[in-house]
Image (cartoon, helix red, strand yellow):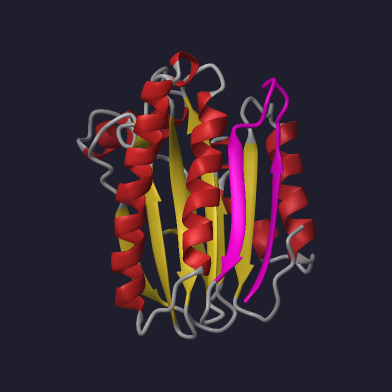
Amino acid sequence: MEIAYQTDIGQEREDNQDYVGVFTNQDQLTFAIVADGIGGHQGGDVASSMAVSHIGYHFEQTTFKNPMDAVRWLSDQVRIENEKIIDKSNQFKDLNGMGTTMVAAIFFDDQMVVANIGDSRGYLRRNGELNQLTEDHSLVNELVKRGVITEQEAKTHPQKNIITRTLGISPDADIDINLYQLESSDQLLLCTDGLSNMVSNQQLDDVLKSDQTLAEKCQQLIKMANETGGPDNITVLIADNAQEVDDK
């Protein structure tokens, strides 16, 4: 599995509250995670870094007999981390109300576990087709599902930034975790909404199918998001079912 990632402050933010990490466990399995912090004075930065560093560290200690073990482990870790973020938020006034989105993947030889909470996304490019694997936990997505607004209207809706599920904030961290087959030449894209809000699916697909290196693809996607305005932090992680890990 070859992986590259990059994060960028964007054009309008004073700090970067996105965090990204890649970790390897005792079985030499790979865990990739992207988090987008929200709320609090500096709270978003704290919450997202906690989620990535804590869950990543605990992953490094694990061994799994099968993918379902990984599913159960990740579900438990998210619940534990949710409690830690809430506890820290309650300890410090300037962190009150902090939380973070999360999208993550664990890669086995022929399967992958994909998990998300909030509106950070996972996309899979397979056999020339790009599909979104994750579902946004957001107000506008709920309105789209109910038929109140169209997907096009959701892109410019004034409440598009309202998240309905996060780590932190609520005692119930209801994360979606799914198991997928992993095929040769699959590409998985994990990203924050700083990318997905600014770059179309067609543009994502065009970059992913290009002959650029994975690092160049990450750079290109961030450049495109910034050229479109870059109002938010932007984080991109691309995993290609190839061989080695490249952390830049």
Residue 73 located within the stretch drawn in magenta: no
Identify the residue at horizontal 49%, vertical 51% (top origin). Answer: 54
Task: Choose between 172 and 221: the one closer to the eye.
Answer: 172
Identify the residue at horizontal 38%, vertical 46% (top origin). Answer: 81
Q: Position of residue 138 (x, y in %)?
A: 34, 34
Left or right of residue 37: residue 81: left
Q: Position of residue 73 (x, y in %)?
A: 33, 65
Residue 77 found in image quarter: bottom left
Left or right of residue 234: residue 138: left
* Residue 182 in view of the camera: yes
Residue 232 found in image quarter: top right
Q: Position of residue 94 (x, y in %)?
A: 49, 15
Q: What span is colored magenta in the figure?
A: 1-24
Q: Position of residue 133 (x, y in %)?
A: 40, 59
In the picture, the quarter occupied by the N terminus is: bottom right
Residue 10 located within the stretch drawn in magenta: yes
